[in-house]
Amino acid sequence: MDYDYLAKIKASISLYTRKKTSNILDGEFGSIYRGRSFDFDDLREYVYGDSVRDIDWKSSSKTGRVLIRRYIADKKHNILFVGDCGRKMKGDTDGGEAKSKIALTTMGTISYLVNNHGDDYALLTSTDQGYDFSFFRSGNVHLENLMLSYEKCLEYEESKPLNEILDYVAENIRRKMIIFIITDMAGEASLDDNLLKKLTVMNDVLIVSIEDAYMMGENLFDLDEKAYENDYIIHNKKLHEIEVADRNSRKKKCQDLYKKYMISSVNVSREGEIVDKIVELFEKHRNVEGK
């Protein structure tokens, strides 16, 4: 990643949220601390992902509920990355580049911006041993650990479908968040009205969709069948036109659904366009109708 270039654009990019300012999700910050602030503010109930070090045992004992000490420094965005993985992410984009590499670079680029903004962020992925969820933290070490975790996840052949992962998020992570979803066409196709309704009740959702390669060209390999496509398919112009029409129809269906729930999205095909696409994504979310 070109960190020098990212540093230059960092000053002009801000995270925006359409939700009203409340509790830990604030649109503007009076102060961002690099470490733990000692300015105690209030208490709130424990939610999945909180550190046990922040539990106020005395207050918890009195109320019968597990309560967390909240500091001024904690009143900032909570960013959740949901990284799609599995066999389908081992394919190529329509730009001829590896989808897994673009997914990892996309996650790392956004993490870099979030980290420098002072926000806490976490990663949720599906592995062959179940869900892998990190705590909400910030810092360069945390960034590197999340990158390594996602890189490892992208090596797995099997993964839960994206809609199941997001349903798990909606049901189990009870905090206001900005959710960045990194997926592909198949992942987008799994998102339905009911799921997005649940997901956007408390959260802002932004999607980076990695474009799949077309079934036309030379030496196309089918990851599901584990075999190369035959010449009739990869050189048939009529089939290609049908594929393009079907792809456009799917995209329109997704965009109509995203508009309904004020979800911002961009499509990425090449590693060299990632930064510009992320800038576009932030600007879209900033200007989305109703914000």
Image (tube, rainbow, N blue to C red):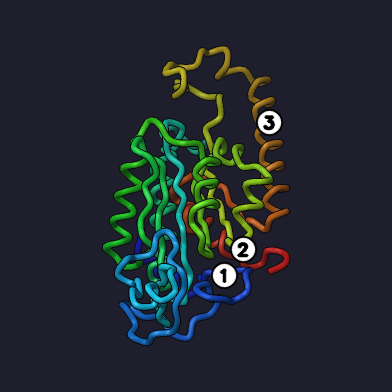
- Residue drawn at x 44%, y 22% as measured from the top left: 221
Q: Are marks 3 and 2 in contact (CB under 8 Å)?
A: no
Q: CA distance from mark 1 to mark 3?
A: 33 Å
Instruction: Identify residue type, mark 3.
Output: Asp
Q: Position of residue 51 (x, y in %)?
A: 34, 65
Q: Is residue 76 left or right of residue 34?
A: right
Q: Position of residue 247 (x, y in %)?
A: 65, 34
Label 3 belongs to which residue? Answer: 246
Question: Helix or strand or loop: what does disc 1 sit on?
Answer: loop
- Residue drawn at x 58%, y 57% as measured from the top left: 205
Query: From the viewer's perspective, is the residue at label 1 or at label 3 nearer?
Result: 1
Query: From the viewer's perspective, is the residue at label 3 or at label 2 nearer?
Result: 2
How many C-alpha atoms fall within 10 Å of the one at disc 2: few (<14), some, or many (≥20)? many
How many C-alpha atoms fall within 10 Å of the one at disc 1: few (<14), some, or many (≥20)? some
Q: Quadrant of residue 254?
A: top right
How many C-alpha atoms fall within 10 Å of the one at disc 3: few (<14), some, or many (≥20)? few
- Residue drawn at x 34%, y 72% as measured from the top left: 54
Q: Position of residue 245 (x, y in %)?
A: 70, 31
Label 2 belongs to which residue? Answer: 285
Instruction: Identify residue type, mark 1.
Output: Tyr
Which comes before the other along the chain, label 3 or label 2?
3
